[in-house]
Image (cartoon, rainbow, N blue to C red):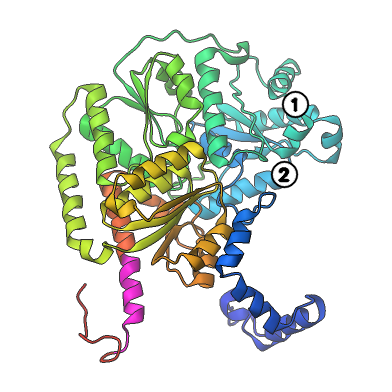
Amino acid sequence: MTQNADHVLDHFDLFRGPEYQEMLKNKRALFENARDPAEVERIREWAKTEEYKEKNFAREALTVNPAKACQPLGAVFVAVGFAKTIPFVHGSQGCVAYYRSHFSRHFKEPTSCVSSSMTEDAAVFGGLNNMIDGLANTHAMYKPDMIAVSTTCMAEVIGDDLNAFIKTAREKGSIPDDYPVPFAHTPAFVGSHITGYDNAMKGIISYFWDGRAGTIDKVERVPNDSINFLGGFDGYTVGNLREIKRIFGEFGINYTILGDNSDVWDTPTDGEFRMYDGGTTIDEAVNAIHAKATISMQEYCTEKTLPLIAEHGQEVVALNHPISVKATDNFLMTLARLTGKEIPESLAKERGRLVDAIADSSAHIHGKKFAIYGDPDLCYGLAEFLLELGAEPTTVLATNGGKAWEKKMQELFDSSPFGKNCKVYPGKDLWHMRSLLFTDPVDFLIGNTYGKYLERDTGTPLIRIGFPIFDRHHKHRYPVWGYQGGMNVLVQILDKIFDTIDLATNMPAKTDYSFDIIR
């Protein structure tokens, strides 16, 4: 065998060994029912045509590789942002394993989450007993200050009632009467992870502000001058929330971040295991009702949460992933207006440095065409920044984008001369994107790790921005919000542009006529 104890190979080299190559060859010949290679190639070439694209865009009952995840993933994201809180997903163990692994692979950190472990009997008779036992075990074993409950497909299809189940669990003594167990129904077969974020955040806020389920008294609002902040579902939450805290600190603003998961997904290696780290405390969540206003950094992640907050007398402001100079200007001016404080000179200087960097690099970005996919707010923020750079976000696709997002994107395109040839595609998937990259080619693709297959198939260079990023490390530690975030995104785009140029000009006197080492 190629592998041995004295010379351990990783899988990149291991499967190139002769015995594995022979095994894979036999597997293809004996079991895969492979078609004639010439016919496969003919169909592959046809799938690049306008004719195929027309058929591809005509499909209605089939989704191929959607650029989204399911609701409970968003609910888990919310729950870990509250101090000593454990997410409890009412459903099967397999579903919860997916949520934990998805986050752990992106953030390179363990993600704690428990399941009610529903199986076939629960699917027939209901999951009440699973809820009763599961809450008791979670409370006893992990000793959280709060358990945040959400659901999966199985629990929703059979109609399990979380409110009734949790009440019964209290009556059975699984958890104390006054113990906080906020919940949200998050059916995975509708919406996406941003819907799950919205439902779960609304559930927690409503629980503490409205005295949900009679377990706590309703809070009477006494307005103060603090600001609440909602980050939304964000793969850069570690870097972004720390950048937001820094900006608030520069202003001298009293604030509460609702759902602060920046520490739990960036714990140090110092000999101590931290199942819980950081997060918004229960007292902070309760007292957030008294704030003057709440700012959401992602409008389409908080479509239900912001109206609930507004009903409690707060001003609400919805932004769209501020990456561009203009978007960050708007964010800072909103803070200044809400608090009556001047924008700090330190932040004004950061703005000037970003503008200077854009000017330094504009010749390399101007006129370049980009395709973008991801969540609605991220797509909007990236497209706005590209227009500001003089680039063309030719294709913008969000599987979980709706008609309101489509309209807003079109208004953004119409506001810039660089947007006249740009198109927006709500509700489409990455197989649609494949057709577009072949029939309406662009210079670069921006998206998450799954764009790697599009890059290989279509030859369009991929810039990895979004969630999840599995095949590159530590990007979540760097902000993409604010002037510093805009600088990080600018550098990432430029690095890919220069790498692509270098690959195409690596033959002196043939493709590299100027022996150029300066960009």
Left or right, 146 with respect to 472, comes to right
Q: Amino acid at mark 1?
A: Ile
Q: Label 2: how many residues lie within 10 Å, few (<14), some (14-19) or many (20+)?
A: some
- Is there CB contact under 8 Å for labels 1 and 2? no
Give the residue drawn at x 77%, y 31%: 130
Left or right, 291 with respect to 330, comes to right
- The CA distance from mark 1 to mark 2 is 16 Å
Q: Is residue 145 magenta?
A: no
Give the residue drawn at x 74%, y 29%: 131
Q: Along the line of sight, which residue is nearer the eye, 412 or 114?
A: 412
Residue 278 in sight in this render: no
- Identify the secondary structure beneath mark 2: helix
452 lies above or below 487: below
Q: Quadrant of residue 319?
A: top left
Q: Along the line of sight, which residue is nearer the eye, 43 or 496?
A: 43
Sequence-wise, the earlier of marks 1 and 2 is: 2
Give the residue drawn at x 19%, y 45%: 351
Left or right, 273 with respect to 270, comes to right
Where, quadrant-wise, is the C terminus in this rendering? Answer: bottom left
Image: magenta residue range? 495-507
Q: Quadrant of residue 275?
A: top right
Q: Amino acid at mark 2?
A: Gln
Q: Along the line of sight, which residue is nearer the eye, 316 or 206?
A: 316
Q: Position of residue 411 (x, y in %)?
A: 37, 41
Q: Position of residue 194 (x, y in %)?
A: 53, 39
Q: Position of residue 385 (x, y in %)?
A: 31, 50
Please give the residue where the numbered disc 1 appears in the rendered image.
Answer: 132
Q: Which mark is residue 93?
A: 2
Residue 250 in sight in this render: yes
Q: Is residue 496 magenta?
A: yes
Judged by its main secondary structure, the magenta piece is helix
